[in-house]
Amino acid sequence: AQSVAQPEDQVNVAEGNPLTVKCTYSVSGNPYLFWYVQYPNRGLQFLLKYITGDNLVKGSYGFEAEFNKSQTSFHLKKPSALVSDSALYFCAVRDLNYGQNFVFGPGTRLSVLP
Amino acid sequence: EADIYQTPRYLVIGTGKKITLECSQTMGHDKMYWYQQDPGMELHLIHYSYGVNSTEKGDLSSESTVSRIRTEHFPLTLESARPSHTSQYLCASSEYGGGGELFFGEGSRLTVL
């Protein structure tokens, strides 16, 4: 079975500093990886995905993620954090062997301090 | 903006009532999903569908039921609500294919008194 881990429950970063939200995964084949963001009392919004190709994927709102096959990681990054980036972030992998369903990590709460 | 809509956004009801949470999407997606999420916590898949007349149970056992009579519509029903059903319910859809992402609705926050 496929699984996703987000080792940090909470990440705190000062505004203007770079941020990283970590994600590691376990899959049996080629991974299809996704990042989502959730603001309070809202649904999840898609940020970016890795399917194939360049290991560095660029997405919405200045976010990017780096796929590292040897470390089975897909960390989310942003060069300069904004207070408005404070939210809950979920990493997900699409399981092609499980009805094509999505397996989500437990989420990481990002707080950007002014 | 994703074209997937959930109603109601907020619902407060008494124990024993029957409720239906509505979900519709205009993207023509075959796959639709229902997730349950306590505030700020992880998502649990409770139901999904491959298309019309297809419904499957997810990872988390749920007393709710779903139906898929039309491609665009995937309602969730609780026959007799209990306080333990208090949660947020998120509907989502995707293309049937490895690279397609999930599109989420804004969620329905249910409180059972």
Image (tube, grey):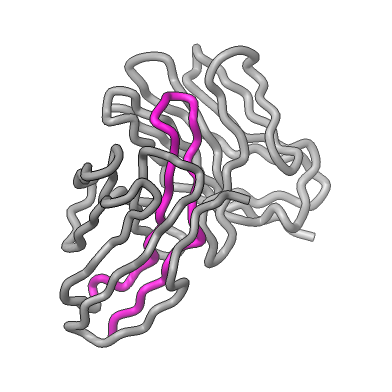
Magenta part of the protein: which range? B84-113
Q: Is residue B92 above or below residue A65?
A: below
The image shows residue B21 at horizontal and vertical percentages of 34, 67
Furthest-front residue in this view: B70
Residue A7 in view = no
Image quarter (top left, top right, bottom left or bottom right) of the N terminus of chain A: top left
Furthest-right residue in this view: A16
- Residue A56 belongs to the span the image colors magenta: no
Q: Quadrant of residue A31?
A: top left
Judging depth in this view, the residue of B33 and B22 nearest the camera is B22
Judging depth in this view, the residue of B83 and B17 nearest the camera is B17
Judging depth in this view, the residue of B17 and A58 nearest the camera is B17
Residue B78 in view = yes
Q: Quadrant of residue B16?
A: bottom left
Looking at the image, which residue is at 76% across and 39% down? Answer: A62
Looking at the image, which residue is at 27% across and 43% down? Answer: B52
Looking at the image, which residue is at 34% across and 35% down? Answer: A101
